[in-house]
Image: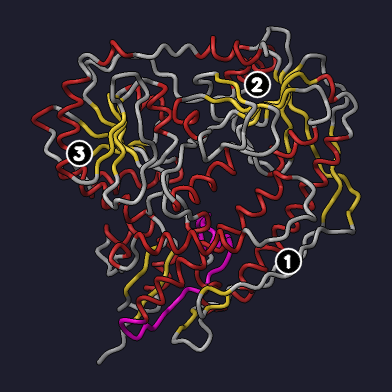
Amino acid sequence: MSQQFFSFVQSKEEIEFILSKQQDITFIPLNLNTLIYLKINTLKFLNIKKTLNNDDFKKFLNFSERFLNTLKLDKIEYEAVKIQFKSQIRFIINSCIYVLEIFNKLNNSKKVNLIQSGWSGRKTNYETDELFLASKILAHCLKGKNIKFLTKDYERKIRKKTIYEYKTNYSLISNNSILINNLGYNFYRILLFKKFFQKVYRFKFENEKKNITSFFKKIFLSLIGYKEIEVIKDDKRINKNFKLPEIKLAYGKFDISKIINDRKKELEVEVSETYSKLTAIKKIINFENLKFYFSFHCRGLDGSISEILAPTKCKTINISHGTVSEFYNKYDRLYKKIIAESVFSGKFKNYAVQSKICEQSLLNTNKKIKKIIKTKNLIYSNVTSNIKYKNKILYAVTLKKFNGLQFYGVEMYYEFYNNLDLLNSLSLKEKKIEILVNLHSSHKSLVNDMNHLFPNLKFSSKKIDHLINQSFALISFSSTAIEDAVSSNRFVVLLDQWKRYRHFKGNIYKNFNSIFYVNNKLQLTKTIERLLKQKMKFNFFINPNNVKHNFKKILRN
């Protein structure tokens, strides 16, 4: 009997490299990009949906959270940095156990021979921005197994990084001013609704991605009071780096300690750099002149700034751009608390509650949060057009990269693909209904291939506001797009073919149901037919959504 070869892959470039060395091989795609490439080119690949199931995702959740709860992080001064550290360790654990569980199940049914590229990290000659992890995980966890590496890139050691002090180019902050963590996620609205002479500051770090901003936009932002405080690297080195004890962790018979500790070393450098930046920020003399600090992040440096400002009179307010909701069972609780930890936690003095979904989360998921401001929508989509004559349905979900996997409450990339199959098979043309599929900008290159694979669907990477404006309903699983749709008075259909996760139960409007939960094609078809009738009278239940008024409410506090 001839040998059967398998390979875990993360990019089309990696697939092509492996095929140049070995033709007869079954690939195991680790993200949407590789899955689509394999489909388009009719290459053999493993159907992971037949390999993993809901029980596996529950096991993954239990494993990672049980371990993370034992981590001793008392050495970390800031709560927000602790949250960031835990989240990054969770990601690397998830990458490890995902690959190892697939291998284990495959190996139990047949003798597996692996051929891996050996690619590791990021290198220019890989010709992709993908962060390669699979080969390194397999090399350290499958010693003695039938595995061949085409390169030895995975053996590269982590380079020691020099930590420098930081300094700011600013010393004076205007009285009664505002600090924001970013202009993204519609935070530019703060500039539009603040008092005219009120200054809005943001810390700009030299290693952050450069935004292409036109000259005229920069002039406009300056005229309405926007200023950036540069935090730049000094020449002085910091000799004392932050260190945590070594981690010991095994997933079943697989020792993943080496992989986790390598990531820990990288994070120790990141923690040291964060401390250095925060030290520079604390040296700004008149921090007390800040009236507000708004942030849509709770973890890392952004969340830590709220802790620095705790002793001052500055009102630190979290305005979440995630979607946090009430939990309904044990695993729901585990997943939703992970999400809330990133977007609705920390040590802010107040938390903006922008929706009924978020308000319900205060019953259990976020019951520790007491100081809230019920603002209604601030930074979600603010589409005001009537849905009566709209003929499009938007499908939008959250997709994670291999190095940022989450389980249970997020659909996997192959589940997303299966949903597209279902949506593509719906008979909606006679009803003159079109389904739009929102692809994140990171998957923009896939639009043409997706249109080819699913001719009855229309794919787009345009802004969510634009797509919601064309639609009368949203189909999703757990994306923030749910909040965008609710704030724009659209119907929401929670599609869960896997009978695994329900993001929200209940009504947004009194005596009128606008959020539906379905598990199969028949239920989805009947729900769409129902919505086509209801959208003609939906305007009677429209919830006034005056973002300007909502911001005035929070800015006068």
**Label located before the other in sequence (1 or 3):** 1
List the residue tagged with mark 2: 218
* Residue 352 counted in the magenta span: no
Residue where numbered disc 1 is placed: 159
Give the SS element for disc 1.
Answer: loop
In the image, taking residue 531 as reference, residue 481 lies left or right, namely: right
Label 2 neighbour load within 10 Å: few <14, some 14-19, many 20+: few
Cα distance in 3D space between marks 3 and 2:
47 Å
The label on residue 524 is 3
Q: Amino acid at mark 2?
A: Lys
Q: Residue at x 44, y 48 (%)?
A: 332
Q: Main secondary structure of the magenta part?
A: loop
Vertical comparison of 107 with 468: above or below: below
Residue ID at (59%, 43%): 342
Query: Magenta segment range?
Result: 108-132
> Distance between the Cα atoms at labels 1 and 2?
38 Å
| Viewer-side residue, 393 vs 341 | 341
Quarter of the image containing the N terminus? bottom left
Residue type, label 1: Arg
Q: Which quarter of the figure is the C terminus placed in?
A: top right
Secondary structure found at label 2: helix
Which residue does the image show at 77% across and 65% down from the upper left?
160
Please tell me which of labels 3 and 2 falls first in the chain: 2
* Dot 1 or dot 2, earlier in sequence: 1
User: Label 1 neighbourhood size at 10 Å, few (<14), some (14-19), many (20+)?
Assistant: few
Q: With respect to residue 69, does 188 lie above or below?
A: above
